[in-house]
Image: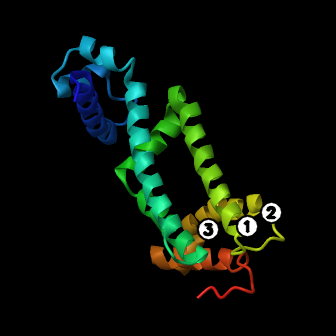
Amino acid sequence: MKRDEQKSIQIIKEAKKLFFRFGLKKVSVEEICSNCKIGKKTFYKIFPNKYEVAKAIIIELEELHLVYYEEVKREPISFKEKMIKMINKKVESINTVEFQFFRDVYENCDELREFTEGLIKESERETFEFISAEQSSGALRKDLPARFMSYMLNEQARKLIMDPEVEKMIPETNDRIKGVVDIIVNGLVNSSIDTK
C-alpha cells in the first residue's frame, strides 16, 4: 500500500470519529491533522479540504448499503419480503451515527448539498429500476406506472413508518415496517401470484 493511500485511510478514519462526534461544521482540518499526527501540508496533499474527506466517508458508507441491497435483490424470496428487508435496513440505519452524520451534512452543509442530493436521486433511481425489473418479470402489476410504485415504496412507506400516529397504533418498529409494506405491496403485487 502506498504511503499516500495509508495516510488517506488514516485521515478518513480519524475524521470519521470527529465528524460523528461533533458534526462536520465544528471540526477543523487542524483537529483532523492533530488526531492523525500529521501536518496540514500532508493533509492538503491528499485532500483539498475537509468536505472531500466527508465525501469519501459518505461514499464508503453508501457502498456498504449498496452491497446489502444487491444481496437482498438476488435472494430467492418474494418481492414483498425483499422490500421488508430493504426498508427495515433503512429504518435501522436512522438510529446510527452514520445516518445522523449524513443528515447533518445534507441539512447543514451547502458545500456538499449537490453531492448528497445526487446520492438520494441515485438511490431513488435504483429503487425504480428494481421495481421496473420486478414489474417486467410479472411479479408486480403492469397497470400502474413503475414510477408511481417506486414513489409509494420510497416516500410514502418512509412517511408512514415514521408517522407518530402510526407508531402509536403499531409501536414495534419491525411490525410497523411489515404492516406498511404489506398494505402498499398487496396493492402492487400481481393478484394472480401467491405472495405467501
Instruction: For marks 3 and 1, give the one nearer the viewer.
Output: 1
Residue ID at (45%, 46%): 62
Q: Secondary structure at mark 2?
A: loop
**Residue flagged by tag 2: what amino acid is it?**
Pro
Q: Which residue is mark 2?
A: 145
Q: Looking at the picture, how far across and down is residue 71, in whole percent?
A: 46, 63
The C terminus is located in which quarter? bottom right
Q: Residues within 10 Å of mark 3 (few under 14, many from 20)?
A: some
Labels 2 and 1 touching (C-beta < 8 A):
no
**Residue flagged by tag 3: what amino acid is it?**
Leu
**Residue flagged by tag 1: what amino acid is it?**
Ser
Q: CA distance from mark 2 to mark 1?
A: 11 Å
Position of 22 relative to 88 (above/below): above
Position of 20 relative to 76 (above/below): above
Q: Secondary structure at mark 1?
A: helix
Labels 2 and 3 touching (C-beta < 8 A):
no
Residue ID at (84%, 71%): 143
Q: Which residue is mark 1?
A: 136
Instruction: For marks 2 and 1, give the one nearer the viewer.
Output: 1
Question: Is 90 left, or right, of 146 in this rendering?
Answer: left
Residue ID at (52%, 39%): 106
Q: Looking at the picture, how far across and down is residue 163, in whole percent?
A: 58, 66
Q: Which residue is mark 3?
A: 160
Q: Secondary structure at mark 3?
A: helix
Q: Looking at the picture, how far across and down is residue 162, in whole percent?
A: 55, 64
Q: Residues within 10 Å of mark 1 (few under 14, many from 20)?
A: few
Question: Is 133 left, or right, of 38 in this rendering?
Answer: right
Q: Looking at the picture, how far across and down is residue 97, in whole percent?
A: 35, 49
User: Of callouts 3 and 1, which one flags the residue occurring earlier in the amino acid sequence?
Assistant: 1
Quarter occupied by residue 18: top left
Instruction: For marks 2 and 3, give the one nearer the viewer.
Output: 2
Residue ID at (38%, 48%): 98
